[in-house]
């Protein structure tokens, strides 16, 4: 059970089905950086060639909690990208792992180091499933491509009692306990840093399997970026999207609300942008996003003592 704010009546226990959830280990490895297309160059929304730096691999100077914008990169994974060369196993690693699950290094110089899943993505062009795992800088420096990573996967099937109509596809029960979830007028309230309209969603709309990866907040319009304040986003931010659904697939749904975690960086390719991995999906009658500048995975899991929130 989870302690939550319950309107003006104080704290109550939020009941979940956590005791019935299967906890199991899955294993992947740190994957090499990938190219979108031959030679790595793509065409931006305004017709410029750009080298797609940042898809997969080990990123040393950007991690969860850092700004999404301002890097020479495209679809940047801020941390360590974990998957499996076998596509069927890669799907299992991605689907069963949830944001907030613990990770452990099984091989190499950093053997025994502990990390945590902070994002998940599905890179459609390369058919590549990836987890984004955060490690402390001193441990990350010892990692290398091919190191084996074990995830304690737990959270698939998570349901909140009384809110069975609000789907929770990829959230670890441990992280749910740390998020300031509340109940107000029959609605589940979830903190987010920003609320954006569903009309801005791009790549991933129409894709099934919302539990497997992320879909993109389009960032290919400088004017719209300014209007919505997207430039202030950080990796790991919780963001709400209105008039969409991500319950069984990503699509337009009037009155729908989705809350996701920013799992990969921005893009200058038309239709692409920061990736949002769904953690809540419901209707506005049952799910209410509440603005909180601290709504970030790094804040909830205390991963960035060097940042001010």
Image (tube, rainbow, N blue to C red):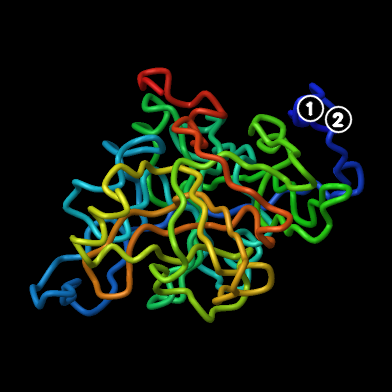
Residue at 53% of width from left, 34% of height from top?
115
Residue 306 placement: quadrant: top left
Q: CA distance from mark 1 to mark 2?
A: 5 Å
Front residue (pair 267, 50): 267
Front residue (pair 222, 27): 222
Secondary structure beneath label 2: strand
Please give the residue where the numbered disc 2 appears in the rendered image. 13
Please give the residue where the numbered disc 1 appears in the rendered image. 3
Q: How far across and how far down the image is residue 243, in percent? A: 55, 68
Front residue (pair 143, 136): 136
Q: Disc 1, disc 2: CB below 8 Å?
A: yes
Q: How far across and how far down the image is residue 308, in percent? A: 37, 20
Residue at 56% of width from left, 41% of height from top?
290
Residue at 9% of width from left, 73% of height from top?
49
Query: Height in image: 93 above or below 9?
Result: below
Query: Height in image: 160 above or below 204?
Result: above
For residue 304, side relative to residue 107 (left or right) = left
Front residue (pair 244, 111): 244
Q: How far across and how far down the image is residue 265, in percent? A: 33, 54
Q: How many marks?
A: 2
């Amino acid at each position: 059970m989870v302690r939550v704010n319950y309107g003006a009546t104080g704290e109550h226990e939020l009941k979940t089905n956590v005791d019935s959830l299967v906890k199991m280990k899955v294993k992947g490895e740190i994957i090499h950086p990938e190219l979108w297309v031959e030679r790595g160059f793509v065409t931006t929304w305004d017709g410029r060639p750009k080298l797609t730096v940042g898809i997969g691999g080990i990123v040393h100077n950007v991690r969860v909690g850092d700004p999404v914008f301002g890097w020479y990169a495209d679809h940047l994974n801020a941390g360590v990208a974990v998957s499996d060369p076998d596509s069927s196993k890669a799907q299992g690693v991605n689907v069963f792992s949830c944001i907030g699950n613990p990770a452990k290094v099984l091989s190499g110089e950093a053997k025994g180091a502990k990390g945590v899943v902070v994002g998940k993505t599905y890179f459609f062009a390369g058919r590549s499933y990836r987890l984004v795992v955060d490690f402390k800088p001193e441990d990350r420096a010892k990692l290398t491509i091919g190191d084996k990573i074990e995830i304690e996967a737990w959270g698939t099937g998570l349901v909140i009692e009384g809110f069975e109509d609000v789907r929770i596809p990829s959230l670890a029960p441990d992280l749910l306990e740390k998020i300031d979830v509340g109940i107000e007028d029959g609605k589940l309230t979830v903190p987010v840093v920003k609320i954006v309209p569903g009309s801005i969603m791009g790549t991933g709309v129409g894709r099934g399997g919302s539990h497997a990866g992320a879909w993109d907040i389009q960032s290919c319009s400088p004017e719209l970026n300014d209007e919505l304040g997207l430039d202030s986003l950080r990796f790991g931010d919780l963001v709400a999207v209105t008039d969409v659904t991500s319950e069984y697939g990503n699509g337009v749904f009037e009155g729908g609300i989705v809350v996701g975690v920013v799992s990969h960086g921005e893009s200058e390719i038309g239709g692409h942008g920061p990736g949002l991995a769904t953690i809540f999906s419901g209707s506005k009658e049952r799910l209410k996003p509440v603005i909180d500048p601290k709504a970030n995975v790094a804040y909830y899991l205390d991963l960035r003592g060097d940042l001010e929130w």
